Image (cartoon, rainbow, N blue to C red):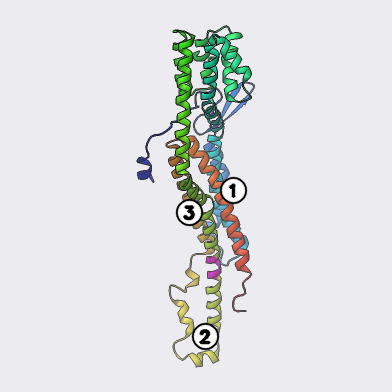
Amino acid sequence: MTMVLSKRPGTFSHTSVDTIPGMPKKGHYAIVRNGKVTQIPLIYVSVAAALLVGFPGILQIFSLPESYSFMNIIQSMTLVWGIALGIIIYTIGSSRQKLTARRELEELENELDVALYDLSDRLNMGNPIEHAIGEAERSLKKGPLKKFFRKINDNMVVMGMPFEKAVFNKEEGALVYYPSDLIKTVMEIVVEGTKKGLRATSSTLRTISKYLKNMKVVKRNITELLGTTVSSMKFQSQFLTSFIAGIIVSLDILLTRILSELSTKVGSFQGSESAAGALGTTGAGNIFQGSFFDVANAIPAEMMQMVVGIYVIQVTVLLSMLINGVENGKDEVYRNNMIGKNLIVAIIVYSIALIMGVFLFGRFEIFA
């Protein structure tokens, strides 16, 4: 996976949102109350949740039951649920707030080409940049772009800042709340353009608008080319692997029951006097003394479930990292969010497949 992703060509970069006021630190969840930000370390929360949910399964490891029962399987599944829950809490908790801000920035960048074209027309009609920004903000519908222009306009009107400070001020500038490298570059060009006149600025904005529009077309084409491959990997990580794993554990339980019943039947058959005379010195029950049919030393169904369940978690995490690497490159926010979301679906599918399989195969009458 690492070798494949190392050959990935560079495409569109993602803006860091760590500098936005109120954003959580790495591995934390931020709670804002009365303007005060409290950072909650998620590693302790996730470990506590994993131990709490998985405690019955941990106890079962040290005292495996002698006979199979459905409740023993459920108890063993708590270990898998606990590990998955801990990972889900950490990955989704550490990425959710940042992802919301990131998507807002992406929506803003996506609408920027249309907004710049509109600004270009207003400047071309002789309106100064301060007036054009205010008119553009009032004409826009609700969304990140409207908020961005409103912040610039409020800084100019309410706080009396010139256009450059309204955008680039380190404390209250619009870029403090929308720290996009693309928007920063565009605004720098606009500021430099205003020094050369309105028509020059208008022409520059129109050129940038066309460039951004072409970038959107390229990005859309890349997404379409990768769509089939990424979709198949998502299906495998969320459904296929976990469903097959659940059925495998169910079949293992059925096979163990069959071998156990065979061992019991043949053992009783060998012990009877009539069977002993018919079998001579060889004894059919000796078949079950070999390693393959040695039910007493076979891996218990509960332990098998734990092994397969942890395998499902590992595969889901690795596939999620690969999918994110293909789609977004080395982006920790999207990676954590994808791991958490895929793991939720995978564990639900695995649990349902296993429980339904146990009920289905448990109805079979062996040697009725």
Q: Residues within 10 Å of mark 3 (few under 14, many from 20)?
A: some
* Circle 1: residue type: Val
Q: Which residues are magenta?
A: 251-256
Q: Specify the quadrant of the image occupied by residue 361.
A: bottom right
Which mark sits nearer the N-terminus, 1 or 2? 1
Q: Nearer the viewer, mark 3 or mark 2?
A: 3
Q: CA distance from mark 3 to mark 1?
A: 18 Å
Residue visible at 56% across and 69% down in the picture: 254
> Of 26 and 265, which appears nearest the observer?
26
Is residue 150 among what the camera can see? no
Per the image, the residue denoted by label 2 is 270
* Circle 3: residue type: Tyr
State yes or no: residue 168 in magenta. no
Secondary structure type for disc 3 = helix
Residue visible at 43% across and 41% down in the picture: 326
Per the image, the residue denoted by label 1 is 53
Q: Position of residue 281 (x, y in %)?
A: 44, 89
Secondary structure type for disc 2 = helix
Q: Residues within 10 Å of mark 1 (few under 14, many from 20)?
A: many
**Mark sitting on residue 199:** none
* Circle 2: residue type: Gln
Per the image, the residue denoted by label 3 is 311
Q: Residues within 10 Å of mark 2 (few under 14, many from 20)?
A: many
> Of 46 and 105, which appears nearest the observer?
105
Question: Is most of the magenta stretch helix, strand or loop?
Answer: helix
Q: Position of residue 161 (x, y in %)?
A: 55, 8
Q: Specify the quadrant of the image occupied by residue 111.
A: top right
